Image: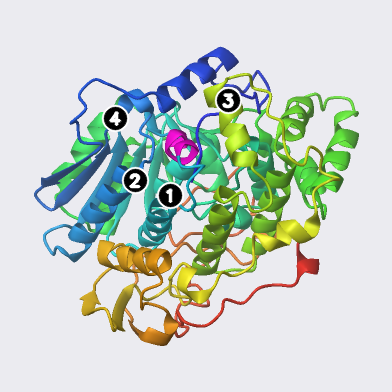
Amino acid sequence: MPCTILSCPLVPSSLCIFSCSFVLQLIDIQMAQVAENPNEEVVLGEEIGHVRVITLNQPRRLNVISSDVVALLAKLLEKWEKDDEAELILVKGSGRAFSAGGDLKMFYDGRTSKDSNLEVVYRMYWLCYHIHTYKKPEVALVHGISMGGGASLMAPMKFSVVTEKTVFATPEASIGFHTDCGFSYMLSRLPGHLGEFLGLTGARLNGAELVAAGLATHFVPSEKLAELEKRLISLNSGEENAVNSAIEEFSVNVQIDENSVLNKKTIIDECFSKDSVEAIITSFEAEASKEGNGWILTFLKGLKRSSPTALKITLHSIREGRKQTLSECLKKEFRITMNILRSVISPDVYEGIRAVTIDKDNAPKWDPPTLESVDVEKVNQVFQPFEQDFELKIPTGDDSRLVFLESEMFSRKISSPLCFDLIDFFHHSIQTGLPGGKENMKIHHMPLPRYNVARYSDDRHENGVMEKGRLIRLPFPYHGKMHKTTHHPDLHATPNLTSKPQTNSKNDHQ
């Protein structure tokens, strides 16, 4: 979740939205301890008839995701999912950003205390799962920056509306982190090897490109966004066809720029299909030497400046994500996140944050410093399952979010995975060693009706069409046939929270 706007230029200057100096200003804003209005709510929730509106409300800090933000989002979404009067959920950001991602200062300040951010990380992954499987229509109104963990509040929603001012990226490798918050699942299902390209380079996509790639559903000019919000509220209904029709009234067809990375499919697929980061860079360098491929040079520069360890973890995770369900991806990402924050194999995430936000020298000293010196066995280590008590407890079947817990400590019904009692119980058990382990706990499952688990076309590589159980426009570079929406093949599998997750062999990931 530690994601934010980064200072290194990861896209060609012709495609950049921000100059380097402006990006550094944005980082300063994100990290700032804002003294004004200290009692201001970081998340606002409005109830208007049958419509509910969530506003991320830290405009001076680009609506970063802090522990308070996660807790409030969880509380509102839980409440409204159970409320029969709530039919439609709108999510937006105040100011010039939707959300710039995780609160870097929160993570950096916790670097000397083991697992100081365990609770917020755990809750964030449950929040991601909740958004993916929410039972009521959600509409994200995405104006401005939507990066890293912030984009996880946009991409999985039934309807995600972007504008010409929307900027998306997953730049985590540039600060020694990894592609998380469900993006190892989502990126791995993009056409061809676009996901590896975005995850490794941190390349930015604008609003039109997001629709073309399938990461957003509609493009609406920014001057019409407020009017669209009013129109959706006036519907006073969550009827899906009515919501879609209302958005279509304001949306326009997208045309991506001829210089867009989405028009570089052949090169991206050729280079980013390689088995290792080293091979990807070698192939990319070879393409860069050819006439007309100067656009590659800036991406190469960004790749070579990123954390070698983070690059290898990111590639491993996205490749593994191709074979995993949403639940399995989130469980895996939780392991990686906690191991990175614990500096199990490298302290790069704290060095990356230091370089771009604390000392601002933009010259991180990675450990180890080169791709060749990264131990593959150590990379595999961060993917290994924890002891069962410490694992992220998400149903493996993707269709159950109602969990009953019975233990010697308490016996009560927990109606959502985001319930603070559940998190506090696990956290308390881990920290104190009090009864709460698998020998003292029985976990049962009660399936709930699912609404929208992200679903992608099985032949994405051949036809390049991503399908998420929702209407999308066919992207220009990735022509292909549309498929009738079907449920995820694992949807009706029996959930099993107590068994050890399946892991793939090391030879499958490089």
> Vertical placement of 359 versus 447: above or below?
above
Residue at the spot of label 3: 356
- What span is colored magenta in the figure? 103-109
Tag 1: amino acid: Asn
What is the x, y in percent for residue 306?
Answer: 70, 35
Query: Residue tagged by mark 4?
Result: 94
Specify whether 372 is left or right of 105: right
Three-letter code, disc 4? Ser
- Secondary structure under badge 3? helix
Sequence-first tag of 3 and 1: 1
Q: Nearer the viewer, mark 4 or mark 3?
A: 3
Whether 369 is among the magenta residues is no
Which-is-in-front pick, marks 2 and 1?
Answer: 1
Marks 4 and 2: in contact by CB < 8 Å?
Answer: no
Spatial separation of the CA atoms under disc 3 and disc 1: 21 Å
Q: Quadrant of residue 18?
A: top right
State the residue at coordinates (73%, 37%).
264
State the quadrant of the C terminus: bottom right
Q: Does 287 sit left or right of 176 as displayed?
A: right
Callout 2 secondary element: helix
**Other-residue count near label 2 (Cα within 10 Å), few / some / many at <14 / 14–19 / ≥20:** some
Tell me if I can see residue 197 in this picture: yes
Residue tagged by mark 1? 117
Give the distance between the C-alpha atoms of the residues marked 4 and 1, in whole angstroms: 26 Å
In three-dimensional space, the C-alpha distance between marks 4 and 3, rounded to whole angstroms, equals 25 Å
Question: Which residue type carries mark 3?
Answer: Val
Q: Tell me how far mark 2 sits from mark 1, CA to CA.
A: 9 Å
Question: Which is more N-terminal, label 2 or label 3?
Answer: 2
Residue toward you, 271 or 7: 7
Which residue is disc 2 drawn over?
Answer: 67
